[in-house]
Amino acid sequence: THFGFSTVPLAEKQTLVDEVFHKVAARYDLMNDLMSGGLHRLWKEALVTQLNPPRSRAFRHLDVAGGTGDVAFRIIEAGGPQTRVSVLDINGSMLAVGRERAAARGHAAQLDFIEANAEALPLTEGSFDGYTIAFGIRNVPRIDRALAEAFRVLGRGGRFLCLEFSSVDLPGLDRIYDLYSFNVIPPMGRLVTGEAEPYRYLVESIRKFPKPEAFAAMIREAGFARVTHRPLSGGIAAIHSGWKL
Ligand code: SAM
């Protein structure tokens, strides 16, 4: 079957996204390493460096679309014992892998896992110091709602950071990137998980995501101040930042 993502209504888009991640959950981390050639590790490091969780005081953090916990573990390791991270994801299969990994790494006491939608957070207003979403916002059907919710749950002085695939703008790299996306990613996905379709969705969703300037405007629209963005690896990914002042 072909998903034909570009034509599905918003409500169905979430259902299709959920099917994709239920299918790939068990092999998600391996696929990340294979498909990005390990680059996602560097990008996540850059995200956590920019967040710079304080070691000397308590820090309450929310990692949305947190999946298998990758970003959350790094934040705990950077922030130390006073850091608490809530990992929120709409997908129970991804969270289940995250719970197992958290226990294996000895981070379970500083973490909690919440199965919920980024568009409607079951969380109190102003209850977090930081909010991250890594490779997640592009899967959310109504991005404006997710941004409004991020703004609501952050306290004053809170930091919003989003790591997402972006627009490759280096001449030469753009052509290599296109070839790689269409000709390497789906077959590689089929080889490792038995399915190519979720990876065609992946490539399509990256292409449809707003350009960096347009996404920055949406972040401002949600109420964030001092909104900035910076490309990583020639624009393959980008980090967008904003503050709730
Ligand atoms: N942040 C992790 C990382 O960087 O490795 C996981 C990223 S994975 C590509 C995208 C995640 O977004 C999946 O775990 C998926 O279940 C989650 N997701 C999709 N739609 C969501 C929504 N509406 N609310 C919360 N999470 C969602």
Image: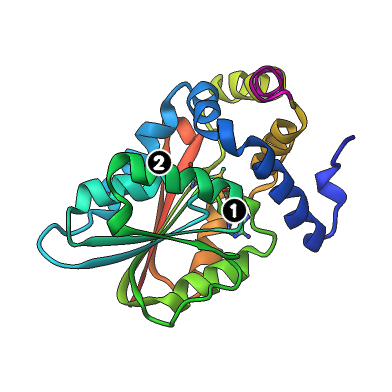
Residue topped by disc 2: 101
Residue located at (28% from left, 62% from top): 84
Q: Secondary structure at mark 2?
A: helix
Q: Is residue 74 magenta?
A: no
Q: Nearer the viewer, residue 53 or 222?
A: 53
- Image coordinates of residue 127 in percent, x first then y, are 36, 77
In this view of the protein, can residue 98 be seen by the observer?
A: yes
The front one of 208 and 169 is: 208
User: Where's residue 181, x and y in %?
Assistant: 65, 25
Q: Residue furthest bottom?
A: 125
Q: Identify the residue shown where x is 60% and y is 18%.
A: 176
Q: Is residue 187 magenta?
A: yes
Q: Quarter of the image for the C terminus: give it.
A: bottom left
Residue 178 or residue 31, whichever sits in front: 31
Q: Which residue is mark 1?
A: 92
For the residues labelled 1 and 2, say whether their Cβ atoms are less than 8 Å apart: no
Magenta part of the protein: which range? 185-194
**Nearest the eye: 17 or 203:** 17
Check the image and report above or below for 150 versus 102. below
Colouring rule applied to residues: rainbow
